[in-house]
Amino acid sequence: MQADTLITGATVITMDAQRRVIRDGAVAFAGDTIVAVGKSADLAGIDAREVIDGSGFVLTPGFINCHVHVTETLIRGFIPEDLPFEENLGKWVIPLYKSHDAAEQAVSAKMAVAAMLRSGTTTFIEAGTVIAFDEVMAAIEGTGIRARMGRWAEDRAWDPSADQQAMTAEAFDALAADVAAYPQDGRRIAAWPNLIGHMTSTDALWQQVTDLAKQTGTKVSAHMSPAIDDSQWYLANTGRRPVEHLADLGVLGPHLNLVHMVHIDQAEADLVAQSGTNVTQCPGASIQGGYGLTQHGLFPELAAAGVNIALGTDGADNHDMMRAMPLMAALFKDARQDRALFPAHEVLEMATLNGAKVLGMADSLGSIAVGMKADLVAHDTRRPEWQPINNPVDQLVWSANGSGVHSVWVDGVRVVEAFRCTTIDEDALYAQGQAMADAVLGRSGLPLLSEWPIN
């Protein structure tokens, strides 16, 4: 057998059907596809153009971040953390975000991609909040990451005098044009008709994008019920809770990824399970935002009902999936006082295999197995947080973090090597990002609020 790359001597967490963890393991890939996995001795006869000594490394599949706002990076650390939810979004986050010009959005997205690649994320789903869509697509095209992107699309006419029909047509036409311009045809970066969600989209737009997704083989991802506001609005305006209303519209199903889903009741959880709708939780954002995840979240019930639960990192402050995993593993252990909930191996499935299901790519992503895409992460275990190595799966979730990611391959291309991106000039990017952040925040007129003086 011939291969382009053979990695030997590693501990391989395969996530394959048997969930094998192979010590002194080897992985070979040719082009973008894994062609062999096993013990190093068993793969010794492979003729590889490049042989990499993987001793001292744990190999995992690439992580799949199922909800991230890639164009918020420039405002990282600026938003006060003690604001009520509506004030946080309405007076700070959204006005700051919408003040970005196209170049600033492009650089922000590229910085987010660098952060994800450097911490082992090989695929992400954008949250549906890109404004300068074409410019952002061009900016991340050469980074090597895999992505499904969505533009900012909402159509509800809050002003009674507005032309609701025209607003819906405009929003849908933009989403349909994106899907046509960036089709899901094998390219790494493609467009989805994502929605902001919450209560910002009309019933007509929900139904239209659902039909578009089913016709094109794409998916739809949308925010729903992180705080109680969504439930209150839907009850007041439709007489039904949010997921019940979506069920009435006929838009639930395996094509849909609902994000956050903290404030749902058992009837909504049952509808999600019955319909095969996916759910993504962003535990870091939930606890930072004070959403009440541990008090109200029905994630143990969702998991018990067979709902596919994936993970995301959400906003600007953190793009490291290896920080999201221990949070998800811990929160409900404490909330329900049940240490059996969400063990490390289940959470690692959420960050890999379950994310692949959300994408509709479970046949090619999420595991290290023959025929799968060569999306791999090499974690350097010659670090204090890894030593000694006893159970690599538990230690990956509970002990390690993204700073230990040494190398990353996407489609067999090495996009991170020796802790640096190979496709991005990081020093130049960070300098450009700082200058743009200074410009965005400077013209906002908003103060930098800090309990301690920053001079």
Image (tube, rainbow, N blue to C red):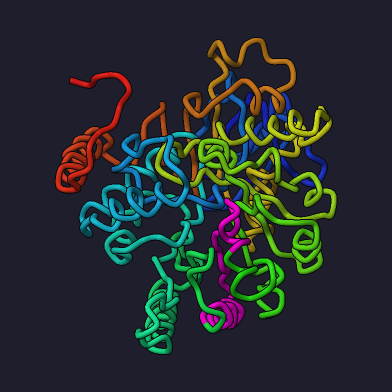
| Count of numbered circles in the view | 0
User: In terms of depth relative to the viewer, which is nearer, 33 or 406?
Assistant: 406
Quarter of image, res 27: top right
Rendered view: 330 above or below 107 = above
Residue at 30%, 19% in the rendered image:
452
Q: Is residue 80 magenta?
A: no
Residue at 28%, 31% in the rendered image:
449
User: In terms of depth relative to the viewer, which is nearer, 249 or 370?
Assistant: 249
Residue at 66%, 36% in the rendered image:
328
Q: Position of residue 234 (x, y in %)?
A: 61, 69
Relative placement, left or right, of 445 versus 331 is: left
Q: Is residue 298 visible?
A: yes
Relative placement, left or right, of 313 versus 35 is: left
Q: Position of residue 268 (x, y in %)?
A: 75, 62
User: In terms of depth relative to the viewer, which is nearer, 1 or 316?
Assistant: 316
Rendered view: 290 above or below 381 = below
Q: Is residue 2 visible?
A: no
Q: Position of residue 187 (x, y in %)?
A: 46, 64
Q: Position of residue 394 (x, y in %)?
A: 71, 25
Query: Which residues are drawn in magenta?
Result: 205-232
Quadrant (top left/top right/bottom left/bottom right) for the C terminus = top left
Relative placement, left or right, of 164 versus 411 is: left
Relative placement, left or right, of 113 versus 306 is: left
Q: Residue furthest front?
A: 236
Q: Is residue 215 magenta?
A: yes
Residue at 77%, 58% in the rendered image:
269
